[in-house]
Image: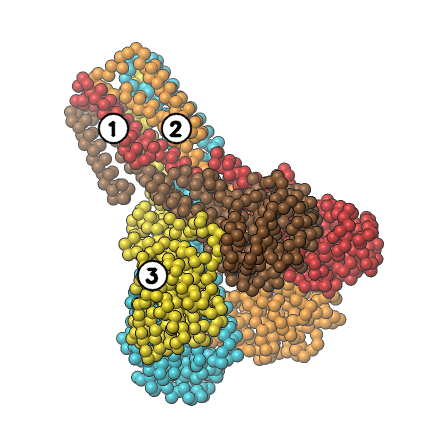
Chain colours: A yellow, B brown, C red, D orange, E cyan
Amino acid sequence: MGRFILKQKKEIGLSPDALYFRGKKKIDHVLLRVIDFDANNLEENAINKVNEVLKYQKKETVTWFNIDGLHDEKIMEEIAIGFNFDNLILAGVMDTQARPKVQEYANCISLSIKMLQQDEATGSISVENLSLIITKKVLLTFQEKKGDVFEPVRERIRTQKKRIRNSGTDYLAFTLLDIVVDNYIYIISEFGDKIEGLEEKLLLNPNQSVIDQINSYKQELNYLRKNINPAKEMILALSKMESEYINEDTYVHFKELLDNISHATESTDNYREILSDQLNIYHTTMSTKLNDIMKFLTVFSVIFIPLTFIAGIYGTNFDVVPELHYKYSYFIMWGVIITVAIGMLIYFRKKKWF
Amino acid sequence: MGRFILKQKKEIGLSPDALYFRGKKKIDHVLLRVIDFDANNLEENAINKVNEVLKYQKKETVTWFNIDGLHDEKIMEEIAIGFNFDNLILAGVMDTQARPKVQEYANCISLSIKMLQQDEATGSISVENLSLIITKKVLLTFQEKKGDVFEPVRERIRTQKKRIRNSGTDYLAFTLLDIVVDNYIYIISEFGDKIEGLEEKLLLNPNQSVIDQINSYKQELNYLRKNINPAKEMILALSKMESEYINEDTYVHFKELLDNISHATESTDNYREILSDQLNIYHTTMSTKLNDIMKFLTVFSVIFIPLTFIAGIYGTNFDVVPELHYKYSYFIMWGVIITVAIGMLIYFRKKKWF
Amino acid sequence: MGRFILKQKKEIGLSPDALYFRGKKKIDHVLLRVIDFDANNLEENAINKVNEVLKYQKKETVTWFNIDGLHDEKIMEEIAIGFNFDNLILAGVMDTQARPKVQEYANCISLSIKMLQQDEATGSISVENLSLIITKKVLLTFQEKKGDVFEPVRERIRTQKKRIRNSGTDYLAFTLLDIVVDNYIYIISEFGDKIEGLEEKLLLNPNQSVIDQINSYKQELNYLRKNINPAKEMILALSKMESEYINEDTYVHFKELLDNISHATESTDNYREILSDQLNIYHTTMSTKLNDIMKFLTVFSVIFIPLTFIAGIYGTNFDVVPELHYKYSYFIMWGVIITVAIGMLIYFRKKKWF
Amino acid sequence: MGRFILKQKKEIGLSPDALYFRGKKKIDHVLLRVIDFDANNLEENAINKVNEVLKYQKKETVTWFNIDGLHDEKIMEEIAIGFNFDNLILAGVMDTQARPKVQEYANCISLSIKMLQQDEATGSISVENLSLIITKKVLLTFQEKKGDVFEPVRERIRTQKKRIRNSGTDYLAFTLLDIVVDNYIYIISEFGDKIEGLEEKLLLNPNQSVIDQINSYKQELNYLRKNINPAKEMILALSKMESEYINEDTYVHFKELLDNISHATESTDNYREILSDQLNIYHTTMSTKLNDIMKFLTVFSVIFIPLTFIAGIYGTNFDVVPELHYKYSYFIMWGVIITVAIGMLIYFRKKKWF
Amino acid sequence: MGRFILKQKKEIGLSPDALYFRGKKKIDHVLLRVIDFDANNLEENAINKVNEVLKYQKKETVTWFNIDGLHDEKIMEEIAIGFNFDNLILAGVMDTQARPKVQEYANCISLSIKMLQQDEATGSISVENLSLIITKKVLLTFQEKKGDVFEPVRERIRTQKKRIRNSGTDYLAFTLLDIVVDNYIYIISEFGDKIEGLEEKLLLNPNQSVIDQINSYKQELNYLRKNINPAKEMILALSKMESEYINEDTYVHFKELLDNISHATESTDNYREILSDQLNIYHTTMSTKLNDIMKFLTVFSVIFIPLTFIAGIYGTNFDVVPELHYKYSYFIMWGVIITVAIGMLIYFRKKKWF
């Protein structure tokens, strides 16, 4: 219900900077995690209070402050005050229904994107809103629930001492977005595999169940597209943004991200077309089959109808039916019947009906 | 009738600045309401004469002057003179059929947008034209009839002492447009809910009534789109307008408005596609069903036609039909009939017809 | 014939400045009319010679010189010489098949647009080419035949002493274009009314005649679109043209014109979509009906075919058919027949075929 | 075969400046013709050697050097050397499969366009590549075979002493392109005439032959479009090119050319839509007819099937069939039969099946 | 499987500069080949170590360093170090699934494109990723496996002493891209030939096998398009790139390349449309045929059904059927039957059913 757009009556007319949670609560307690690092040092903590993270704003190290759970208005307000953010920014973070977007503010860049996850069993796509706030020294990330999607990045921070440990919050933001986009591509490629596999089924045994699958894939691809296309716009805007919070060297990564997400949207469109073509194949097959069935019925009926009529004529009980009494009438009737039948067959063969 | 465009013969060739009401009169008497406020003071009045509002032009406070009812040419003229507006502007306000647009004039910005409302019972969309004139100190709003759509904004002015009470006419205008756009999204999300719910009906019991619903939704979405798309253009133009009447800080809000309305138009397009897909599902189902029906008829007919023919042959009354007199003829006939029937069944099974 | 494009073999390779009339002669004698006015004075004359109008070029007043009938090459040449126009301009005026366009020349702006008129009886659209040449003090208008389309403007010139009498040739040109565009909208709104009215007919009684109407509307809308879209381009170009012949104040009017014509093209597209949807409704209804018919036929045939077969078996004249001689055979046959029929009915009911 | 694109294996990897003829040889010997003129003098010659034309490069007159036949590599090389052209330019001229394009070089502008010709008998379109090289004083034109398409221009050069004799190579190039584009429009208008004429046939007597015509027109329009659209791009590029080889005054002509070719492409698109609509009309008619046929068959079958069954029942030879022996049985049977038939008719009438 | 997009779970979250091979290993050992040349000298070598090529960086000659096989991370690292490339570049080279793209780096331009090859037997398209790195003096090319596609270029280098031997790495890169694009066009033109040939088959003998071919062509064209369109974007970006690594003179070649690839994409689109039209022709033919079949069946059934009924009536065994005993009854029956049949025929002829 309302997978594509959702607005509740009570949300109409709310102030744009009201810290009001618009979404479904997916976690009970808000989790706060901090990773602080530079080329040489690394510190990882789960914290309880927003206060504990504020000190990192003044250190030269890079700090990643991850918040799981968006429903706690008090924490949001503390963050707003602690980091000196306009309420607008955190109101945006709390609106999980909003379109992916990027916006530059006086002291940060705020951006949001949809994380997609496919249910292995049903194949349906679920969506989670991810918000990032890039400041000079701290990257804030907001997720709706605890997840392990970004574990590879944490692993890279822990083990690699190269690029990621020597770059700023902007590069860290890129690696997170990169994982989100990689997940898009992974989901699409899984779909693609299934869709390309339908082809054969469709040719061998076209039936309603294949069609139901095609339709369900179509729906899921629509849903994908609806989430990925605005993300592409957002990344395009990001890659063109001239901001003090983004290092010159990071643009080449954003450009790659843009390439990847373009690849994703193009592939989605490709698969949509393939599904349409498959539906067309099905329709064509159905139409050919219907013609074959009707030809069969027609040939069969048309051959037997006059024969049955002839037999019917001589089943009448008129007192005077001269033919009934000739000795060879019955055999002549058979002759006529066979002649008519063969004539019909020749006629239909000429018409290429069988 | 004429929901999409309407032009009466007598309107052709009218001077563009003629104060001529083009629309349907929806209210008897024009209502004039004034709210005047700054961070500390608030004054709310219903007034009788345009004169009473003119004094606010020179006060430092923000004034919201709301006019319900557009048909009174005299009042319009008084406003034009009182606020020193070009007649063109008020002629535009009185043309309720015009496309949403924004235009900057020497001493104001004039803009119009369509307010949509869904009839709960029939689901059909009704439309009302809203015009705003933004001047330095007074915001004029023109509605076709009295309504309570903007009540939440009045409530916010009354209770909140924050952003809205500290901003100018441009921010006030934004909050009104925000409510209009929120209403778009609300209507679309209501539609969406119903449309997504059709899916199941369509798979379980595809019949003409589901189709009628799909078609009526399609029509309403068309109508929505026709009203929302120009509004999007208007807001885009507004967010790019460089005007002394719009404060630097307000642009971030216009940009958000643009995001929201983009979300709305995209969702409309998504739902249009879903409806098209649903029609396709219906067609596919119909075509599959027709094939099944015809297969059934054909199998059945083709099995019984030769059997009936055989029975017909031996119902003839020829004097000489040798087979009739053999003792086991009748049983042989049954044997032949059963053999033929089984042969046919095997043949059809091979053709995968049942 | 050739409503959409027309080119005769003999026109190929003509010099672009040849004063050659390309079109159908719709009037016998060329009519020349002059209206000359300023804020205070007004003079209206039918003249016989081009010479009589030339003097107005040097007066400070605004002069509207209207020419009905384009086929007289001599008059055209006199105009070219009298007003010192490049032959190209008047060659363009004489080519009634050309696309609407606007072009700035050294001493004037030349533009052309299609005037549309709907035949009340048949509903088909006829088209007339209108050319305007805007010079500093004289506006020349060229129509294919005498018409009263611009009478409201003449009336406004005669009676109003306001805007139109105080503005220049550019504003006068705008008022004429405004009427042309208003006529577009009027025609579309008439069409729209009829198209929206089809909906009901289509649901109650879908038949070939409704379809014929849909197709004829579609054709006329195509024709409309083909004439209006280039007019929109032309007006867009006009509204962006920086020319000494267009007063700063007139651009706001051109922009409104652009809004109006955009409204027109959008509505045309809307109605085209509605017609497509209506055709879809028709197809869906047809397909549902075909299914119903075939179900009916199948149920009926399938029930009676075996019954007739059973009756046929016992109509055979074999000497030995034991069942014939049991006393209750006939009644047993009825029993079997009724059982089979009821069984079939239950089967079909389960398959939801009726 | 390969009407839309053609590439031979051996052409892959050729140097871009190789003077290699890619196309079909349509003429045996290369023809060289020269027309040299200014306002007062005119000289027309067929020449044998490229050498003879080189002297005109230094004269103040305008020279038109026409080459019919592109297969002679030696002549091409002589031209390249004599006029000091980069080999790339003439390699481009010899590639008759290339897309229309315009390119500015150090000492010339090179452009190519497709000339179309319609076979009067079959209606199929044939295509010839035309290349122009505009230098300061000489215009070189390359055609695949001898033709009289440009005869009107030669005639104008010979007889008129006006514009064409007083302008440069750029205006001469324009007049040639103008004829090519006029021919496009002529062909489209001929097609259009036929297509608009199909409408009536389609309504009166829709059959496979009309459909075959629609499909063949569609194909030819596709082919037209494929050749005209890149020509439009080329002319657009030409009209925006700032080059010393194009006189300021000539741009207004290029703009007109652009208008004309836009008219052509729009009309092609219009006719494609009309053909699509006609196919739709056909489908709708077919579907309506199929419904009518099936209704007819169903009504007829359904009325007679039970009647025949009743008659069959009383044709059985059971010893005991009590009804057979009542005196009025036969007449009662007729009564039942007629009642059933009338009942059926009333039922079908109610269902609006006839 | 996964022809359109492919992403493995383990690739998610990899660092963008990880030298990780993403693709299928198509060759066992990496082959390194070097061609070094200037206008006068030429040297060709297969080498074993990356070291051996590094010296060419400092020579004035042009060096083409070709690497077949991308899976060896060690070699890649050596190249990165030897040529001082950012790891990002070679990580990109090793990702064979990436979209064609061009990117300028501090000391080189890196670009990639898909090479297509058609399997002669099955007609299916296979794809190989080609990466080029253009530095001042060395051009590096990376292929997935050993191939002879670029042999013509090597041949030109060996034999021609003209353009290619006198130009830089950029022109060499162009000649390679030129071959790739020529191969696109060749493949499309082969497809085109087959597709245009289908037309006739479709008109003479429309059957499922033609449809299967159409569908398989459609699929392959989709796949082509998916690979060629991003290549076009890449070449467009390349032709607009202002870089010190690209010589002024080379842009005209890139522009030609762009023309060629535009020609390719347009032709692909043309053929897609043709295939769609062919499917439409098939559908129309099927629909016409179905109508013909049903008309035939209906005419036949409708004529014989009442005749058989009449015969059935007089086959009943009622004791009292007065007609049976009139002498001429049988002949009267025949008269009635023939009259009814002729009447029906006239009726159907009037309805134009045969």
Mark 2 and mark 1: Cα distance apart in space: 23 Å
Residue kind at label 2, given as amino acid type: Phe
Q: Residues within 10 Å of mark 3 (few under 14, many from 20)?
A: some
Instruction: Same chain for labels 3 and 1? Say yes or no.
Output: no
Observer-nearest residue: E234 or B182? Answer: B182
Residue at image point 47% right, 78% down:
E171
Tell me whether circle 2 and circle 1 mark residues in contact (CB < 8 Å): no
In the rendered structure, the residue with mark 2 lies on which chain?
D
Provide the secondary structure element on which disc 3 rests: loop
Secondary structure at numbered mark 1: helix
Q: Residue E167 or D183: which is nearer the viewer? A: E167
CA gap, disc 3 to disc 1?
Answer: 69 Å
Secondary structure at badge 2 equals helix
Identify which amino acid the numbered label 1 is placed on: Val
Q: Residue at x 29, y 23 (%)?
A: D312
Q: C196 or A113, which lies in front?
A: A113
Q: Residues within 10 Å of mark 2 (few under 14, many from 20)?
A: many
- Residue A114 point in image, percent of width and height: 39, 60
Residue C73, given in percent of the width and then of the height, sits at 76, 54
The C terminus of chain A lies in quadrant: top left
Q: Are marks 3 and 1 in contact (CB under 8 Å)?
A: no
The residue positioned farthest toward the top in the image shown:
D327
Q: Which mark is residue A30?
A: 3
